[in-house]
Structures are given as structure tokens and as C-alpha cells.
């Protein structure tokens, strides 16, 4: 079954597919699975196995990491045309955070097998995909570093700790 | 240089079912206000007054005996230092400061904290004494179970910080009536009629209590439930009083105090920016809810068929509501309720209980000498009156139960 024009138009806005030719994009689109989540439904939890990446088509996904007891820190909100879960796509490691629908959500799923097939059948598209993915990784690394600094600032402000003193 | 906005964490608090959750933004400011600075142990510091012929107010020298560092404290800083006992939050300390000096200096507390931290004279205490005692005995299974239960209950907190518009509407659509002379007259009238009904019921108390018959458990549960609802009403009226004096209601919610006392609460700390009269009215009006409900209970009981469940329920509710009124307004019972806050506000001694208990403890352990100045008399009076009052309260309740069972 070939992907709809609507899906193709949506994928054009997804950053990792920006460098794809129309035939390559259509080929990828055919391999994507669709999934819907109701509001508050958990997609996966921290520690769950996984080997797929998710692209948000509609709605918002909350990515959170356990802090203590039932409290989790919200790391990021994933909006339409953005993606998450890519770490498990590459190394098959357990999920590093929990993903849960903040609203009703529609997702597109890219599985590891589909990525491998793309690498073999459309190497130029795969290269463009990996290049964009590296760019995104770097941005997210910068954001994580900023979050660590912000968490440290929170702690200092909350305790009034004076670290300038010797 | 422009200061950055306070840092915030967005936290997801998961409910028991595992899927449902709520999102909370916790600013570092909230953490700061709730932190509890604790001065080092008494063996680790010395403090002495520095009298000067020039300066009008005395200064104080604070010495860290471990590091041999010295600090000069003003009288205001000395007051703050005395509050830093590890049990009072920074918000509570700031409140005590306003009550003591009638003004607030926004820099004095952070500056003092910095100074004390540099001199290694301060630690921050995040937990209550109960939790510290439990943590020390965590090896015992029962203690661990209690600790877990308390932790679970402490997490139960249903609150909203966006309640001010709600209270404003409540006030506009009828709440303002509570703060009119007509309401005071109605309240007094109801109290008189209720007292008359209570006296009439007292003579036939045995028959009244008989109304519970074999449904004592049902009676207990319904009376408690009504009382619980009245506590919410009590807090709502505090909030309305805050609106009446054009101050902001910061939060309203439900939680388990210390992990085991289910309670509604309202944050009206903004009332401290209003006059003393406003603070007194805000404190007293909440408690008057119990006066009104108790009076209604007695009146209903007086008119209900003798020996029926309705009569017993109404009478028992009346007794509990009026006891709650007394506990809320009577300041001498070691509990810092509305009456206590009015008393310390009027006396201008915000740390009365703390100071009084410290003084008496020193007397009993032989660490202090008996000096009968104005302050010492006040402290002694507070402890003696509170002890006698608590004993009388317990005796009264035992007598009521014994009378009902005989």
C-alpha cells in the first residue's frame, strides 16, 4: 500500500527526511507504521526494550525521566514533525526515558529493519538521514548540557548555598 | 546586571494507576522558601552581646568554636539566628520577622544566610523531627513500614495555586456578607440560641447519646465526615477574609500534615502585608465557622425526636464543633492555631511557644536560673496555662465519655 500524499507532505517537514528525493521519501513512507495513542497513554517506559523511532504526526508527547518515587522530570515535549526514541533505533538499548501522550497523538514508526533496508536500497537518502540525525544529536547534547546547568542553578537558588565564598 | 528568572523544573507526578499524572512547575523560589536552616549545635558556637556607648541598639558577636571564626550580628540578625532551629522554614522566619519588627527587609535574610554559611554556622534541614527519628530507627520493620506509609501519605497533596480568582468570585457572589455587622449579630444570636439548646440537652445527655444505639460506628464516621467538611469551610472563610482585606490568596488544597493528619489548608500569608486588625479578623472568622455549625447542631438536636439517631448525630456534631472552636481560638494549648497567632500578634512575641518551652526546659534541667522579668513571666504563664488547659481538656473528654457510658 503506498503512502498518501498527505503523509508525504508531512514527511517533507520532518527534518531527517529533508534531503530525500521524492522516490526515496515515498519508499520510506511505505515502510512507516502508524499508531494512535489516547491522551495520557504510555508509549514506553524507561528501561523497556525498543528498536524503533517515533515521529509525532499529531499531538504532543512528553518525555520524562524518573527522579524519585512517582516524580519524573519532564525532559522535553515532542511536537508534530519532531521525533524521539532514536537511540534505541541505533543501538537497541533499553529506553532511557518514558514517553507518554500529553494529548491524543498520532505517530509514525520507523523500525530498525526499515532503516537497514533504506541503507541498502537508497544509500544517498540514508546518508542524508544520518547527517541530519547527527545534527539533531548535537543540538540535543547542547540542550542536555544546558539542562544540567539549569538543574545546578535550581539547586543553588533553592538552598541559597553560597559557593562564591571560599 | 539583569538577574535571570528563577530556575524551574517541570516535574511529572504520577498517580497510582501508573498512567495518569499531573504536571507541576517547581521554581527554585519555592524550594528556597520551604528550606529550613539549622544553626550548628550549641557546643559549636558562642554568642555574646556587644554593648556600645555610641550605638543605640546592641550588636552581637557570634563565634564558631570549631573554626574560630567570628561574625558581627545586628539585633535583627540575632533575632533571625534564633529562629534558625531547623524546624522553621524560611517563609516562617520571614513571617516572624515581620511580626517582630513590623517591616520587612528583603535583603537581610539572604545576606545573613550567606554570612552564616561562610562561617560554617548553618546547615539546611529538610525533614521534620518525626521523620528524623524514624530514619534513625529504619532498621526495625515496623518503623520502616510507618516511614513508607508516611511517605505515601505525604505525597497526597491536592492543591491549586490559581485560586485567587475563585475566592474573589466567592466573595463577590455572597462571601462579603460574612464581614458585615449583620453577620456578627446573626452569629452572636445563633451562638446564644445554640448555647441555650446545649444547656437543655445537657440535662438529658444520656438519652441523647442513646440515639446512636447499635450504630456507634456509623455515628462516629458521619460526625467525623461532617467535621472534616467543616475544616474545608474553615479554610474557605480564612481565604474570604484575605480577599476582604484586598490581599492575595496564594494556595488552597488538601494534604496530610506530617504524613498522617488529613487537613485542608489555605495560604493567606499575604495578609501579613495588611493591618493587625486584618490579621486578627482573618484568624478569628475561620474559627467562627465551628461556632455557627456547633450552634446549628445543638438547635437541631434540641428539636429532633428524643433518643433518635438524628438527635445524637446533631448533638455529637455540636460538641465536636464547639470543641474545635475552643481549640482553634484558645491560645494556651501548645498548638499554634488561630488563637495562638492572634495572641503572639497582639503581644508582639512571634516565637512565644518556642521561647517559653526553651526557658522552661532550661529551668527543669537546671541549666537556667529563675529570673522573673516580664518576658520570663510571660513564658512561665504560657507553659503553666497550656499544661493546665490540656490536662483539663483531656479530663473533660474522659468525663464526657464516662458519663455517656454509665
Image (cartoon, rainbow, N blue to C red):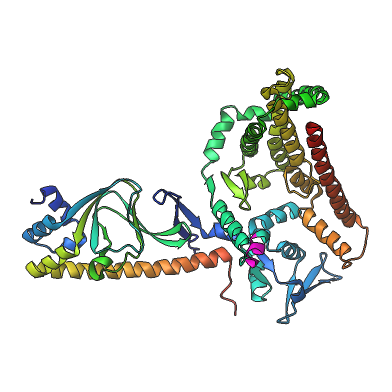
Q: Which residue occupies 85% across, 64% down?
A: B362
Q: Is residue B4 magenta?
A: no
Measuring from the top left, give residue B58's x and y in whole percent. 82, 67
Q: Is residue A4 left or right of residue B335?
A: left
Q: Which residue occupies 79% across, 70% down?
A: B60
Is residue B181 in view? no
Magenta residues span: B131-137
**Front-lying residue, A81 or B114:** A81
Q: Is residue B136 magenta?
A: yes
Measuring from the top left, give residue B150's x and y in whole percent. 59, 55
The quadrant holding residue B181 is: top right
Q: Is residue B400 above or below residue A161?
A: above
Measuring from the top left, give residue B299's x and y in whole percent. 73, 22
Measuring from the top left, give residue A26's x and y in whole percent. 9, 56
Q: Is residue A4 left or right of residue B295?
A: left
Is residue A111 in view? yes
The quadrant holding residue A111 is: bottom left
**Front-lying residue, B377 or A139:** B377
The quadrant holding residue B32 is: bottom right
Tell me the chief SS of the magenta region: helix
Amino acid at each position: 500500500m503506498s503512502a498518501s500524499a498527505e503523509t508525504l507532505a508531512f514527511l517533507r517537514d520532518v527534518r531527517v527526511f529533508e534531503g530525500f528525493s521524492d522516490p526515496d521519501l515515498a519508499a520510506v513512507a511505505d515502510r512507516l507504521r502508524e499508531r494512535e495513542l489516547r491522551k495520557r497513554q504510555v508509549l514506553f517506559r524507561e528501561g523497556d526494550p525498543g528498536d524503533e523511532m517515533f515521529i509525532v504526526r499529531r499531538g504532543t508527547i512528553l518525555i520524562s525521566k524518573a527522579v524519585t518515587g512517582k516524580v519524573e522530570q519532564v525532559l522535553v515535549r515532542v511536537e508534530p514533525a519532531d521525533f524521539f526514541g532514536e537511540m534505541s533505533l541505533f543501538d537497541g538499548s533499553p529506553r532511557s526515558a518514558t514517553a507518554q501522550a500529553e494529548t491524543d497523538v498520532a505517530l509514525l514508526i520507523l523500525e530498525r529493519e526499515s532503516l537497514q533496508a533504506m541503507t541498502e536500497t537508497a544509500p544517498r537518502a540514508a546518508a542524508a538521514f544520518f547527517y541530519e540525525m547527527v545534527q539533531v544529536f548535537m543540538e540535543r547534547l547542547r540542550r542536555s548540557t544546558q539542562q544540567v546547568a539549569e538543574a545546578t542553578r535550581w539547586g543553588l537558588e533553592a538552598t541559597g548555598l553560597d559557593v562564591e565564598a571560599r | 546586571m539583569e538577574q535571570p528568572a528563577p530556575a524551574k523544573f517541570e516535574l511529572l507526578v504520577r498517580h497510582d494507576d501508573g498512567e495518569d499524572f499531573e504536571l507541576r512547575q517547581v521554581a527554585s523560589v519555592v524550594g528556597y522558601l520551604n528550606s529550613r536552616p539549622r544553626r550548628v549545635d550549641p557546643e559549636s558556637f558562642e554568642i555574646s552581646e556587644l554593648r556600645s556607648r555610641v550605638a543605640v541598639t546592641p550588636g552581637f558577636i557570634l563565634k564558631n568554636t570549631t573554626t574560630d571564626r567570628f561574625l558581627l550580628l545586628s539585633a535583627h540578625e540575632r533575632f533571625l539566628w534564633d529562629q534558625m532551629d531547623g524546624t522553621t522554614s524560611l517563609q516562617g522566619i520571614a513571617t516572624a520577622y515581620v511580626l517582630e519588627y513590623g517591616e520587612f527587609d528583603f535583603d537581610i535574610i539572604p545576606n545573613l544566610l550567606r554570612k552564616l554559611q561562610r562561617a560554617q554556622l548553618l546547615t539546611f534541614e529538610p525533614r521534620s523531627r518525626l521523620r528524623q527519628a524514624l530514619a534513625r530507627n529504619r532498621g526495625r520493620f515496623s518503623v520502616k513500614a510507618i516511614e513508607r506509609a508516611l511517605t505515601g501519605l505525604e505525597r497526597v497533596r491536592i492543591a491549586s495555586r490559581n485560586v485567587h480568582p475563585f475566592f474573589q468570585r466567592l466573595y463577590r457572589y455572597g462571601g462579603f456578607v460574612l464581614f458585615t455587622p449583620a453577620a456578627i449579630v446573626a452569629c452572636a444570636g445563633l451562638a446564644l440560641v445554640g448555647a441555650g439548646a446545649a444547656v437543655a440537652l445537657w440535662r438529658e445527655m444520656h438519652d441523647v447519646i442513646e440515639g446512636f444505639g447499635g450504630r456507634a460506628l456509623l455515628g462516629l464516621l458521619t460526625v467525623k465526615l461532617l467535621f472534616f467538611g467543616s475544616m474545608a469551610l474553615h479554610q474557605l472563610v480564612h481565604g474570604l477574609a484575605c480577599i476582604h482585606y484586598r490581599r492575595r490568596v496564594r494556595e488552597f488544597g488538601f494534604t496530610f500534615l506530617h504524613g498522617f493528619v488529613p487537613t485542608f489548608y489555605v495560604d493567606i500569608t499575604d495578609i501579613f502585608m495588611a493591618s493587625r486588625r486584618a490579621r486578627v479578623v482573618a484568624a478569628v472568622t475561620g474559627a467562627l465557622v465551628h461556632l455557627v455549625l456547633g450552634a446549628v447542631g445543638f438547635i437541631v438536636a434540641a428539636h429532633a425526636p428524643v433518643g433518635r439517631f438524628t438527635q445524637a448525630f446533631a448533638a455529637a456534631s455540636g460538641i465536636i464543633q464547639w470543641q474545635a472552636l475552643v481549640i482553634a481560638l484558645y491560645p494556651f494549648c501548645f498548638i499554634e492555631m488561630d488563637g495562638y497567632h492572634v495572641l503572639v500578634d497582639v503581644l508582639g512575641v512571634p516565637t512565644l511557644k518556642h521561647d517559653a518551652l526553651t526557658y522552661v526546659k532550661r529551668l527543669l534541667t537546671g541549666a537556667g536560673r529563675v529570673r522573673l522579668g516580664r518576658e520570663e513571666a510571660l513564658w512561665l504563664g504560657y507553659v503553666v496555662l497550656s499544661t493546665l488547659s490540656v490536662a483539663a481538656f483531656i479530663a473533660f473528654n474522659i468525663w464526657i465519655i464516662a458519663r455517656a457510658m454509665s
